Every structure is written in C-alpha cells, then in structure tokens.
Image (tube, rainbow, N blue to C red):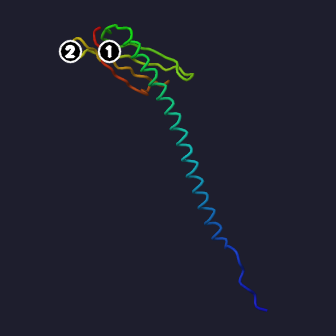
Amino acid sequence: MTGSPARGFTLIEVLVALAIVAITLGAGIKAAGSLTNNTARFAEVTAAQWCAENRLTALTLAHLYPDVGDSDFSCDQLGRTYSGKLVVRPTPNPNFRRVDAQVLDENGAPILLLSTILGRS
C-alpha cells in the first residue's frame, strides 16, 4: 500500500499567513487611531474658530474704533473654555486698525489665528 501525500498547510505557511494578518491588523489599528486624533483636532480647531469669529464680529457690530494694544478674552464652545488674545495694531492708513484674534489651548499653545481690518465708523 502506497501512501498518498498529505494534504494541508505546512507550519511555515501557517506562520507566514499569521504574520501577514498581524501586520495588516496593526496597520488598521494605527489608521483608526490617526482618524480619531484628526477628528478631535478638527473639533478643537472648529470651536476655536467660532470663538475668534464671535470676538471679531462683536467688535465689528459694536462700531467702535479699537485702541491699539493687547487684551485677553475667553469663550465657551462645545463644553470647553478657550482663552484668547486680541491684538490691535495700527495700519499705514490711520483710519484702519488690524485686529488679530488668537485662540490658545489649555497649555497656552496657539490653536488658531484670525485677522481682520476694522475702520472708523
């Protein structure tokens, strides 16, 4: 009686397949983690932009010609309080002022900077 060759996978083939699956799963987990970080960053930047836009819009609607100088502000968006810095600088034309609204994170690092020009009313 002659034996027929055994059918199936060798141990090496199984180990190679497991290594490929492990590498693929690792890459997928890393990609999912990156997406989560990007989503959190996007939410933070969006809230910071709302803060800065609200501050600059309030200045525009007040029809006040802002004094040159720096001031601090804060605002609440999405359940968090953001701190910010309002910087008013003169322009070559004395009828206009450049206003920068910079929103900072809890460590004082800048998240966003929005600028506008305000004129005398």
Q: Is residue 42 left or right of residue 3?
A: left
Residue to which mark 2 is pinned: 93
* Amino acid at circle 2: Asn
Q: Residue at x 52, y 43 (%)?
A: 34
Q: 78 above or below 90?
A: below
Residue 29 is situated, as x and y percent measured from the top left of the image, at 58, 48
Count of numbered badges drawn on the protein = 2
Q: Residue at x 31, y 15 (%)?
A: 118
Quarter of the picture containing the N terminus is bottom right
Q: Which SS class for mark 2?
A: loop
Q: Which SS class for mark 1?
A: strand
Residue sitting nearer the eye, 115 or 24: 115
| Labelled disc at residue 114 | none
Residue 43 is situated, as x and y percent measured from the top left of the image, at 51, 30
Asked whether the residues under the numbered discs 2 and 1 touch, taking CB atoms below 8 Å apart as contact, a structural biologist would say: no
* Amino acid at circle 1: Val
Residue to which mark 1 is pinned: 88
